[in-house]
Each structure stands twice: as C-alpha cells, then as structure tokens.
C-alpha cells in the first residue's frame, strides 16, 4: 500500500485483483508543468501511449493521463493554490470559457 500526496488530494495504490487491461478506464492527474512530466517519463524510459494525450501505463497496466492545470475545467480556490505554492497558475482561454459557462470562472466567485 502506498499513498501519494497531491496537495489537497491523494492517490492510494495497493496490490489488487488480477484482471485484463481496460483501455477506457484511466486515472487523470493534473500537474502544473506537463512538459516536466513528459521529460521525466522519457528520462525513466516510460513510453507514452499513442494518441494526442500524455498517457502511459503504470507497472500494473493502469492507464494514467497527465493533464496540465491550465487546460482542465475546474479550479482551486485562490487560498488553496497559494497554500500549495501554485498561486502563479492560470487557465487557458478554453478552460476559462467552459468554467464561465458553468458559473465557476474565477471572476465569478469560484
């Protein structure tokens, strides 16, 4: 059993049942620097899966998708970002548009 602390989230990993791979199911991990993760994966010899996303398989065959914070359609409260040392992060225009459409854009009190 292992816990990976992700600021205000965590990921728990443990030995589990044996089953065939499932191509659709995956875990998405939001990062502040997607390119740094891409470089770390390459440095460790971990192969990116084909496609437009930064996906790879963990040692147990689970699909992991790496997503840049600027692109994801959710936001953290400013005090949480500051507490995590990530107050400098911003959303791209597409993410802000989707957040706005949901009434969750930072300028809407999110």
Image: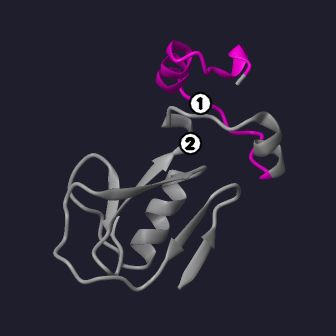
Residue 16, picture quadrant: bottom left
Residue 5 lies, in percent from the top left, at 66, 68
**Image position, residue 23 (x, y; %):** 19, 60
Which color scheme is applied? Answer: one colour
Residue at 60 percent of width and 76 percent of height: 3
Please, which residue is most extreme toward the front here? 17
The residue where tag 1 is placed is: 91
Label 2, on which residue? Answer: 69
Q: Residue furthest left?
A: 20
Task: Give the residue at x 56% y 34%.
Answer: 74
In the rendered view, does 37 fall on the left or right side of 86?
left
Crowd rating for badge 1 (residues with CA inside 10 Å; few <14, some 14–19, many 20+): some
Span shown in magenta: 84-109
Residue closer to the observer: 82 or 42: 82
Along the viewing direction, whichever of 1 and 53 lies nearer the viewer: 1
Q: Residue at x 32, y 65 (%)?
A: 56
Magenta segment includes 92: yes
Distance from the alpha carbon under mark 1 to that under mark 2 = 7 Å
- Residue 110 percent location from the top left of the image: 70, 25
Label 2 element class = helix
* Above or below for 9 versus 17: above
Residue 108 x %, y %? 69, 15
- Are discs 1 and 2 less than 8 Å apart at CB? yes
Q: Residue at x 70, y 55 (%)?
A: 8
């Amino acid at each position: 059993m292992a816990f990976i602390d992700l600021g205000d989230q965590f990921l728990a990993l443990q030995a589990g049942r044996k089953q065939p791979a499932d191509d659709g199911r995956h875990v998405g991990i939001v990062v502040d620097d997607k390119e740094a993760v891409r470089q770390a994966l390459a440095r460790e010899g971990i192969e990116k899966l084909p496609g437009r996303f930064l996906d790879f398989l963990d040692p147990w065959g689970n699909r992991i998708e790496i997503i840049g914070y600027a692109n994801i359609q959710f936001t953290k409260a400013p005090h949480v970002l500051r507490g995590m040392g990530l107050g400098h992060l911003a959303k791209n225009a597409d993410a802000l548009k989707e957040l706005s459409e949901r009434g969750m854009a930072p300028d809407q009190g999110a």
